[in-house]
Image (tube, grey):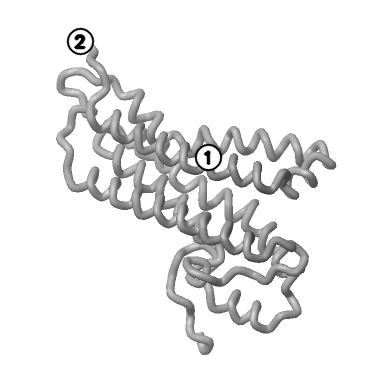
Amino acid sequence: RQRGPGFRQAFTTSLTLIWSFRLGTFLFFRFLERKSDFRFIQARMKHGYHMFAWTSQGMWCFIQGLPVLLLNLVEKSQGNSADAPLGRIDRLGWMIFFVGLVMESIADKQKLAFQRRYPNRENRPFIQDGLWSLSRHPNYCGESLVHLGLYFSSFMAYETTQHHLIALVGVFFSPIFLMQTSLPWIEHLTDKKYGESEKYWDYKLSTSAYLTLPRRPKFI
């Protein structure tokens, strides 16, 4: 007989909602403060890119949600894997999730505070404070950790190799998609703006583009 969702399903889904609410409210209030977003202004000028931007975001949300979607599709019945006892893998997943959530939240807050300090976009220096001194895109790194944590939090409920492979598509889709779309474009704009600054190139060549790591020594 089917029963309601178990703790693993309910808790992991709640983690997803927490992350979604945090990011959604941040983006909403940031938009209210800015009144516009230059990326979407440019996108509206090109119909093909405009369609790609919105459809790819919808696809992105669906694919990234695969680990949790699969978890909730597992029938919670007697003897099913959804009833597997909570263990180290679950706790590992929760830890990775909260590390990623805190990292993404701090990175977003630091960048917003930096932009408020320099409201003139044309004369704004490049950010290299806080987490941004350890990664050129620490918010992206934090988001990837969030989804990796959700995968481990769902791990014990998956019954087949196919379940794991499908869920891993969601885990790896985010960094691959970001590194092939948003990240190169942002890097191109940043290089174009600060490309004549030696200080900027020292920062770029010694700081990881994606992972949050200590800066590389200049001789490496």
Image point (17%, 32%), residue name: 84
Q: Amino acid at mark 1?
A: Thr
Q: State the image coordinates of residue 37 (x, y, percent, origin top left).
A: 71, 47
Question: Relative to the observer, which residue lies in front, 214 or 128?
Answer: 128
Quarter of the image where the N terminus is located: top left
Compared with 146, 133 (above or below) is below
Q: Which mark is residue 1?
A: 2
Label 1–label 2 contact, CB within 8 A: no
**Callout 2 crowding tier (Cα within 10 Å): few <14, some 14–19, many ≥20:** few
Q: How many marks?
A: 2
Q: Amino acid at mark 2?
A: Arg
Alpha-carbon span between mark 1 and mark 2? 39 Å
Left or right of 4 on screen, residue 189: right
Q: State the image coordinates of residue 167 (x, y, percent, origin top left).
A: 40, 38
Left or right of 121 on screen, residue 180: left
Residue found farthest to the right: 45
Mark 1 or 2, which is nearer the eye? Answer: 1
Image point (43%, 41%), residue name: 19
Q: Tell me which label, 1 or 2, sits earlier in the chain.
A: 2
Q: Which mark is residue 14?
A: none
Task: Determine which residue is flagged by label 1.
Answer: 25
Q: Secondary structure at mark 2?
A: loop
Q: Secondary structure at mark 1?
A: helix
Compared with 161, 179 (above or below) is below
